[in-house]
Image (tube, grey):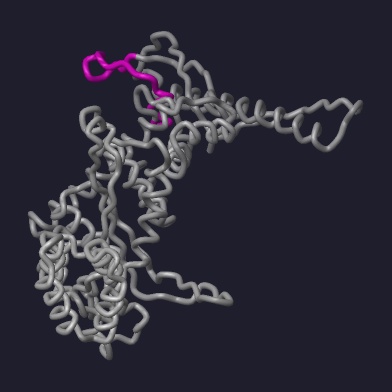
Amino acid sequence: MLRVEETLEISIPREGLNVNRLEEALAEAFEEFQKRVVMAALEEVERGVLEEEQGRVVKKGKGERYLCTRFGWIRYERQKVRYLGEGGKRYGFPLDEALGLRPHEQETDWVRRRGIELACDHPYRQAAELLAQEIGEVLSHRTLHRWVQEEGKRLRREEEAKRERVFEEGDTLDAEEEEREIVVVEVDGTMLSSQERQRMERGERFEVKLGLLYTGKELESKQARRKRYRLKEKVLYGGVEEAEAFGEKLYLRGEERLHVGGAKHLLFIGDGAKWINEIAGADYWKSVYQLDWWHYQRKLRETLRGEEKLIKELMRLLREGKGEEHRRLLRLRRMMIREEAQKMDELIDYLEENWEGLYGSWSLRGKVKAQEVLVVGSGAMEKNIELMIGRRFKKRGMSWSWEGANNLLKLRIERQDPAAWEEWWQRRAA
């Protein structure tokens, strides 16, 4: 057992003393005291390690090292040695090896983790300033960016290895076996401004995909005008990825957390985009598809500009379950116009492509107790798009590389689940 003894003695002048000056004096004294304790602990660890290695190493001078800790920067010297075994060609620092410090590592896991947590919620420069307030030392925002990229890539490699193992090698996941009555899946995408010079000059953007899974809704608060509900067993997954890989990784996330493969019913809600339809129709989902009516109504308004009476009638027919009448009225309107014919054709094609999902959730009525989840819109997804992507990636003047956005998004999503976040850092340290 490591034993370190240090004494803290504080002298505080009485003249002009008040609670604020007392607090400031104590904080400064404790900060210096913490560093002294760390230095004493390092000396004690090294002393013990060198005693154990006596006769197996030859001392070769000392080397200086800087380490950023939650107490600030620590500068210390440690013994360099040559190991007599293995031909006597290996050199090293026993203290670094005892502490699990990798070459060129300049921060503790706590500092790295805290910096990444702040960067997940704030722009990099602001995150660096907030971290400086916590540890009393200034770190460059570029350092935080590097940490995010390194850990985000590590998390992506883990996700990809899992996908290959299951979908290409036929392995199975160790998922919990609780059977859910229903799992609702909502998927959508949003565009980010590209940071790549040529793309930026052309005003090009790239798509970020987000998936949301949940098993029900529960009342969160009841206000005078409206009730607010909370999603039960909410699970998120996102990435800047091709549709096929995104769909497979979303499924794996759902299988791990909610055992979607064993759910009695799967309801998949999307806005009708081709890539979403392809994911929803994949064999491994075995889901009922529901077209998001909110997106469909927006397409109606974009195509039938100024024809509010017609739009209201179309939506009335839709809500009353008269899909065929809705379709006939739309086709009749197409026959009556020559201008804007292409837009009308595109709208009708969109309807036909999503026809099977027009009343998808209605087919589950009477089969599912949690009737509140049998919706025809993706309002929960719209909210999470804003929370997860809009508030961090779409502030004024922001632009991204696809890899930079992808790495940050992976970490930001993982952090939303405290248990998963803690598990990730434990796996990383193992």
Coordinates of residue 96 in the picture (x, y in percent)? 41, 25
Q: Is residue 86 magenta?
A: yes
| Residue 50 picture location, percent across and down | 44, 22
Quadrant where the C terminus is found in the figure: top left
277 and 173: which is toward the camera: 277
Q: Nearer the viewer, residue 75 or 267?
A: 267
Q: Position of residue 61 (x, y in %)?
A: 42, 8
Residue 178 appears in view: no
Seen in the picture, residue 198 relative to 352 is either above or below; the reply is above
User: What residue is rendered at 13% in x and 68% in y?
Assistant: 337
Which range is magenta? Answer: 82-100
Residue 265 placement: quadrant = bottom left
Name the image quarter holding residue 35. top right
Between residues 100 and 393, which one lies in front from this camera angle? Answer: 393
Quadrant hosting residue 12 = top right
Residue 111 showing in the rendered view:
yes
How many numbered discs sit on the rendered protein? 0
State the residue at coordinates (54%, 26%): 44
The structure residue drawn at horizontal position 22% and vertical position 19%, both measured from the top left corner, is: 86
- Vertical relation: 374 (above or below) 281: below
Q: Residue at x 52, y 19 (%)?
A: 75
